[in-house]
């Protein structure tokens, strides 16, 4: 891999560019020409372009370096190692992998910048929607709900990655730019809850085929329930369970159902299937070829990251050798029916005649769920930047297991908790097991392996020190990333560093 380090650090105090040349599968709109921001957003077409620009940020994976959330979180967990050509290939990934981050080393700058860019765009479009006088009531209700959902989405990532962060819910005046201070996680979560509660009533239960990628009512309810569960507040379990039950019940209003075949969930030809609740779309429509601004395209560069380096053989395309799967996960899954849909056995491929380069931390096992497939390699633009493989952030088996967890914690309806756990297992031919927290957590690891959930699951359940301590995780520090030093510098101490990190 020829390393391409993206060095554009965007602080929250920077003026974010709202006009982007972005195009979503659900609506192929590209702003034409330029216009003064004050004179824009006067009609539904222009407001829709603004909403697309907020959605666009969810796709970004190369802000402040390579910061694709799903593989990065897999590397931080016990599912995968960092990988790459050597320890200096992507030092930010290696630092997260062994929990040796500091304010200047680690993925924090990119994650901070991405999420505050999305928040800034959401705040801007919300302010414009409020002032617009030509929008129909139905259109205004839906786009307002989408913007609030997306703001909550970005804040949920920020509070999980950083804990105490500035809470910004309006467009900042110039004299406010350098005066930001942090809010507590409780305050941030309260805003996330508020946005999601206000959002879901204004969203449609289902999304038409021409609008796939837009947020539905079911996705917003599932996201709110997930947020409530992550807060670890027993007083919120009843609402959590009610929301999940609405999403998970047979014959739900959103069309969700488990797929009979587990592997079909991750087939790139089966996007937005009945199990997918929150899916980040990617495509090769832009035929992108700019290494200086990969985010300008629509492809999933994370797919390129996790592929086998210089691979020559059937089925797969060559990748860059990041995120080799740990032997710990291999051993946990080796007798599980989901193994073949989750992990590529490189040694078996070699035995069949394939070749690839063994890279840093190589185990000969690789992520399969989002692997680069020859059949989906782009023929236009730079192929490595244009993988049309979506990221499924929430799916039905995930919400089944979260509801089962909430039910057990609440001591409520054990039969329903067991029914949900058994449904996930029965789909792949596994026998029933008691609905205990340990069994549910184990099922989450196996069912959702390499999908980016494991690290936060370990943190929120208090298991991170036990599981990740041997590779460097420290209690009361490693739960959060360090605050980017640039943010501390520009606010002149208004933003404080997280505990355990030295400025």
Image (spheres, rainbow, N blue to C red):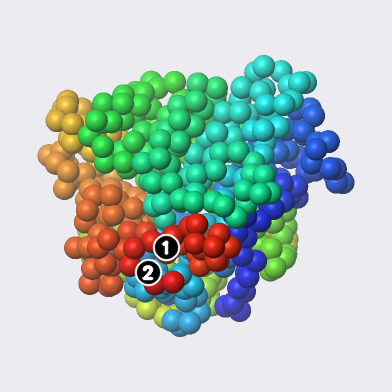
User: What is the spatial separation of the Cα atoms under label 1 and label 2, in whole angstroms?
Assistant: 7 Å
Residue that appears at 66% across and 23% down: 140
Name the side, left or right, on which 297 lies relative to 282: right
Residue 235, position as x, y percentages in the image = 24, 30
75 or 383, nearer to the observer = 75
Q: Is residue 467 above or below residue 55?
A: below
Residue wearing tag 1: 497
Image point 62% across, 69% down: which residue?
A: 6
- Residue 56 appears in the rendering: no
Q: Nearer the viewer, residue 488 or 142?
A: 488
Q: Residue furthest right?
A: 33
Return the residue nearer the eye: 351 or 300.
300
Res 343 quadrant in image: bottom left
In the picture of the structure, the residue carrying the numbered disc 2 is 501
Report whether 409 appears left or right of 120: left
Is mark 1 in CB contact (under 8 Å) with mark 2?
yes
209 left or right, relative to 100: right
Question: Residue sitting at 84 percent across and 42 percent down?
Answer: 36
- Residue 53 in view: yes
Check disc 1: other Cα within 10 Å, few if <14, some if 14-19, many if 20+: many
Kind of element beneath mark 2: loop
Describe residue 205's horizontal placement relative to residue 6 as left or right.
Answer: left
Q: Dot 2: within a 10 Å radius of its alpha carbon, few (fewer than 14), some, or many (20 or more) residues? A: some
Question: In what quadrant of the picture does the C terminus appear?
Answer: bottom left
Check disc 1 and report its element: helix, strand or loop.
loop
Q: How many marks?
A: 2
Which residue is rendered at x = 44% and y = 81% of the image?
87
Q: Quadrant of the N terminus?
A: bottom right
């Amino acid at each position: 891999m020829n390393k391409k380090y993206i060095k554009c650090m965007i602080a929250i105090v920077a003026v974010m560019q709202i006009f982007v040349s972005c195009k979503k599968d659900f609506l192929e709109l590209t702003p034409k020409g330029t216009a003064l921001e004050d004179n824009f957003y006067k009609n539904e077409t222009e407001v829709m372009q603004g909403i697309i620009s907020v959605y666009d940020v969810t796709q970004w994976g190369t802000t402040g370096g390579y910061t694709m959330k799903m593989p990065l979180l897999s590397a931080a967990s016990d599912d995968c190692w960092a990988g790459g050509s050597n320890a200096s290939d992507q030092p930010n990934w290696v630092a997260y992998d062994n929990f040796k981050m500091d304010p200047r080393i680690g993925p924090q700058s990119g994650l901070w910048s991405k999420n505050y860019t999305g928040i800034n765009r959401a705040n801007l479009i919300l302010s414009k929607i409020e002032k617009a006088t030509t929008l129909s009531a139905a259109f205004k209700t839906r786009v307002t709900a989408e913007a609030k959902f997306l703001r909550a989405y970005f804040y949920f990532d920020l509070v999980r990655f950083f804990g105490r962060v500035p809470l910004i819910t309006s467009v900042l005046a110039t004299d406010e730019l350098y005066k930001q201070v942090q809010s507590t996680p409780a305050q941030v979560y309260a805003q996330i809850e508020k946005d999601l509660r206000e959002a879901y009533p204004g969203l449609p239960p289902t999304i038409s085929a021409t609008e796939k990628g837009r947020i539905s009512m079911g996705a917003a309810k599932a996201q709110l329930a997930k947020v409530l569960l992550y807060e670890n507040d027993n007083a919120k379990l009843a609402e959590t369970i009610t929301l999940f039950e609405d999403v998970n019940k047979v014959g739900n209003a959103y069309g969700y159902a488990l797929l009979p075949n587990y592997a079909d969930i991750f087939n790139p030809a089966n996007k937005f299937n009945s199990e997918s609740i929150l899916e980040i779309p990617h495509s090769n429509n832009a035929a992108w070829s700019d290494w200086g601004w990969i985010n300008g395209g629509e492809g999933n560069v994370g797919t390129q990251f996790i592929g086998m380096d210089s691979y020559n053989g059937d089925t797969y395309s060559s990748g860059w050798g990041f995120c080799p799967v740990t032997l710990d996960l291999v051993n946990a899954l080796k007798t599980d029916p989901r193994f073949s849909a989750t992990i590529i056995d490189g040694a078996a491929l070699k035995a069949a005649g394939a070749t690839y380069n063994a890279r840093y931390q190589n185990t000969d096992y690789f992520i399969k769920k989002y692997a680069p497939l020859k059949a989906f390699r782009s023929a236009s633009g730079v192929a490595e930047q244009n993988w049309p493989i979506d990221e499924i952030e929430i799916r039905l088996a995930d919400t089944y297991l979260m509801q089962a967890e909430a039910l057990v914690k609440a001591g409520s309806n054990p039969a329903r908790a067991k029914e949900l756990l058994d449904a996930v297992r029965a789909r792949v031919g596994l026998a029933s097991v008691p609905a205990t927290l340990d069994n549910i957590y184990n099922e989450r690891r196996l069912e959702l392996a390499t999908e980016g959930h494991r690290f936060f699951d370990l943190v929120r359940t208090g298991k991170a020190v036990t599981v990740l301590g041997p590779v460097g995780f420290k209690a009361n520090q490693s739960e959060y990333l360090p605050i980017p030093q640039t943010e501390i510098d520009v606010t002149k101490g208004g933003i404080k560093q997280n505990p355990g990190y030295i400025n």
